[in-house]
Every structure is written in structure tokens, then in C-alpha cells.
Image (tube, rainbow, N blue to C red):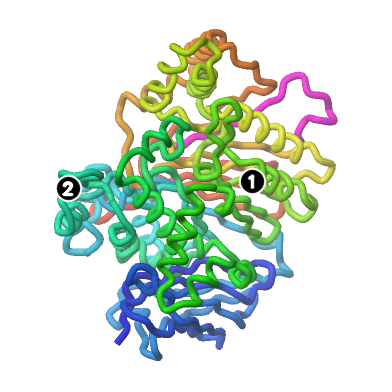
Amino acid sequence: MAGLRLGPLLRYVDWESGSRATVWVEATRPCTAEVRCEDGAAGTAPTFAVEGHHYALVVVTGLTPGATTAYEVLLDDRRVWPPEDSRFPPSTISAPAPERAGADPVRVAFGSCRWAAPPGHGYGPSPESRPHPGGADPIGPDALDTLAAGLAADPSAVRPDVLLLLGDQVYADETSQATRKRLAARRDLREAPGAEVADYEEYTHLYDESWRDPEVRWLLSTVPSCMIFDDHDVIDDWNTSAAWLRDMRNTPWWHERIVSGLMSYWVYQHLGNLSPDALETDPVYAAVRATPDGTEALRVHAAEVDADPSRARWSYRRVFGRTRLLMVDSRAARVLDEQRRSILREEEERWLSEDALSDPGAYDHLLIGTSLPWLLPPLIHEAESWNAALCRGERGERWARVGEKVRRAGDLEHWAAFPESFRRLSELLREVGSASDAPATICVLSGDVHHAYIAEPQWPGSTPDDTPSSRILQLTCSPVHNSVPGYMRVGFRFGWSRAGRRLGRALALHGRTERLGMRWRKEGGPWFGNQLMTLTLHGRKAALTLVQAKARTPGAQLETILERRLTPND
């Protein structure tokens, strides 16, 4: 008898037809998964197997546009969701009404960096092993968990239309005490990679730990989600530089780690990002489902992608009424050659540019999702650009060696560490925002840096023809559940200061870096804590809310830190 190991996760909801959605599940054995909705919509899919695990991505058809319907999950005709003793409201699918695109608000919540359990602490996903809400969590309440608890307790509460998880959904290199115990039962942790995950099976435990949390499990079953990886989904500073990659490939455990990381990302995150039409034409998805055990097909694909990243595109496009989201892979698609260093490969840049510029009159808001912030505090930006100049040999071989050590020690590997990529992205956003039918807002949504802030660029000396009419913003929000040392908080604040800007200019002079044709200022923050941002997009209006999870008695609550209009109210 098949049981439900993990899920369901409501992933893709089709805003263009209003009639389709996808639901992801993991079962305990081979079976047929079925989703049945109260309004008669339904879908079935046989499970496919990877490394002894069984998954299905069910395409639900026949949804009623503009309506919300409860659903249940069956495995071989036996209901497994919702559980008989569930304390949560029914899981639902809300199908948008395409004819009302732009007339109804779209709410996009986003954040990144979520430890399911902090490293070194023994509590995990089960209710009996977690601390009491608002209690002994050393890094404070989990913002995602707190959001879920609040929505479940108040059926009238407004839910996000989509949740964007912008990286570090799991931490392969910083495992909890509970996970370490599982790893120690399988192998000797005194041998590399030690208490980090080593293979696919160990990755599955990370997702179990993260997604079996009762509140989060319910939330992901009823709010559609879009995901993209960042470094900790594989390893800290993944693809920082060519020298870093050479060093990793020389270790005996790296190949299995990267192959397993890409395989598990494909199964647990990437598939759900795709539309039903994209799934129908995906050759890897077809190959994995064509055999009783798709392990070898997926393993070959992951190994090929590791050797040649151009063999896969993890970036994707989503449409929410008159809002366009371009989710960008800023990790696996990098060019690491110091003399032509780029955060995106040529074909990825072309895809981003073409999608951003195509039919701009068809959308009112453009969202660029990238795990790494485009605009950093000015001092940090200049430090990363300076470091990139040193590493490519601008000040000689000795400085290049020093630069590589500084790069790894300081995590200097954001957009600013790829100066040409930064420049091209900036010019693309300026071009889109200066078009005659430009969107009202262009927002770059990012995480990674364990705090939240708002930054806005300016192009001094621009002519009226090339001055953006769109409001262009960097919106950074992390962590969902993590921490940041006190000295880094001081550094982030100093990075925005006048003294920090002056120090940044000194670094630019030393590195002989090219002066930028733009500057930017902080419009809000920095804010520190476990937090989520939500964009509310209604017609050509946009508003932003920032909430933080605060310990209360009883339980935890989301406290509103910021509410701000991003566009004129008329």
C-alpha cells in the first residue's frame, strides 16, 4: 500500500488559461497519484523512480477560472491527503480569471535562506522534536512557519498568490544535529565530506526535514511556489571562480556531491517550475519516466550539465496576469574564465534580454528573480569589483593570488564580482524602463545576504529619451530562517555610509576599475531578522510590505515592519 512520504506541493498554476495546475508528491512505493478537486477538476500521473524514491507531478485540468477549489490526493485510489486528523484548513487551488488580468491584485511573497533546523541543534520537523513556538529557537521564529500558522488560523486572511523561494531551500553543507545522526548511521563522518551531505539519498533527508514541518507542508500545499537554487543548495560559494572549481574537482567526493545536488534539485524544485506544456516537451522528463527506474537517465543528465552547463537551462519565465517574472539562474550558468568572467552564459543573457524586451506592452510589472542581489551596499560593490580586477591580473600576479584568497574568504561573488555582467544587466533594465510602453515597475528580487533592504538606481546626466520612466528597484529579503553575525550587521550598515563610499572609491582606484555610469541609493533598511517581503501589484500600482517573525506568548507572529507604495496612488 502506497503512502505519502512528502508533499503535496502546489507548484505551477496557469494564469494564462486559468484551468491548469501541477501538484508534486513523493510516495513510499510505485503507484498512480491522483488529484481530485471539489469542482470536478482532476489529474493523474504514474510515479517515476529515482534512487529508490517515487515521485509524481500531477497535471490538474478542468479548473474553473476565477474560482478556488479544495482538493485531495489519492495514491492507487486511497486518499492520503488531507490526513484524517488534519488540524489545517483544506488545501486549495485558486485558479485566476484571465479576463481580469490587471483588474485583480497579484500578491508575490518572496525570501530566501531557510534552515529547517539550525546546525548543531537537534530539533527537526516533527512536532515533538521542535521547540515550543516562540520558545528556544536560537535564531528566532521561522518566518515561513509563522506565515503558515497565521494563515491556517485565520481563514479570512489574504494569502499570497505565489511564493518565490530565492535560494538555499536546503543546506547541504550545514546540517542539523538530527541530520548528522542519520549520516553517521550510513558512513564514517571522519572522512570527507564529513557532516555535509554526500549523495542523493542524503539530499532526500534534507527535503524531508524542510518540507515535513506541518505548517510549512500545509502552506506549500495551498500556495503556489516558484524556486531557484543558490550556493548552499549545493555548497557555500558554489562556482565562485575557476580556481575554486579546479580545487573542488580535485577532491574525491565532489563529483558525487554535484551530481546528486543537481539530480535532487531537478526532482524536488526544478520540475515544479515548469508549465505543463514545457513538461510535455522536456526530453529529460520523458527519459526519466520511460523506464521503471529513471536514476541512470537523470544521473547522466546531471553529470553532463556539470561538465557543460549549457546543456541545461534552470532559468524560466512565469506570467501572473500582467506581471512577468523572469527567474534567473545566477549560479550554474556562470563563465569562470577570469578574462571573460560572466555570471550568465551568452545564451542565458540572450534569453533574459529577449524575454525582458519582448512585447513590453503586455505587462505592467517586470520581476527579475535572482538569488544574488544586483545592487549591494556601495562599499561591498566596489570591494567585489576591485577583487575581480585583482584576480584577472590588473595589479599583477602576486595581487591576483591575494585576490583569490580574499574572494573566497569574503564571499565576493555577487553580480558586482562579474563587472561586465553587472553592466549589461544594468543597461538592460535601463533599456526596458526607457521604452515608450515601459512597465510601471521593474523589481529585482533577491536574497542571500541575510538582511533586507531597498535600493534604487539613478543615471546622472541621462537625456529624457534614455531616462527610465519605470521605477527600477532592488528588493532584497533574507533570511527566512537563519542568522547573521553582529560584525556583519555593522559591515552592511557601514557599506551604505559616506565613509564606506569613500573607502569604496579608494578600492576602485587601486583596482583601476571602470567608473559606472549609474549610482544608487538606499531607499529602506537594512532590516535584520527572519522575514518575508510581499509585492502587491494592482494594475500599474505597486506596494511593498515587509514582515518579520517575532516570538510572542503564545506562539510567534508576523510583525509588519514596512508598508510602502512604490508607485503613485493615482
Q: Residues within 10 Å of mark 1 (few under 14, many from 20)?
A: many
Tell me the distance, in whole angstroms, between the alpha carbons under discs 1 and 2.
39 Å
Q: Residues within 10 Å of mark 2 (few under 14, many from 20)?
A: some
Residue 231 rendering spot, x and y as whole percentages:
42, 43
Mark 2 residue type: Leu
Q: Which residue is mark 1?
A: 348
Residue 283 rendering spot, x and y as whole percentages:
58, 67
Q: Which residue is mark 2?
A: 189
- Numbered range of the magenta stretch: 452-468
Taking 281 as reference, is 232 left or right?
Answer: left
At mark 2, the secondary structure is loop
Work out whether 120 lies above or below 206. above
Q: Nearer the viewer, residue 398 or 85?
A: 398
Mark 1 residue type: Glu
Pointer 1 or 2: first along the chain? 2
Residue 44 rendering spot, x and y as whole percentages:
50, 84
Taking 210 as reference, is 457 left or right?
Answer: right
The answer to which quarter of the image holds residue 140 is: top left
Taking 236 as reference, is 362 left or right?
Answer: right
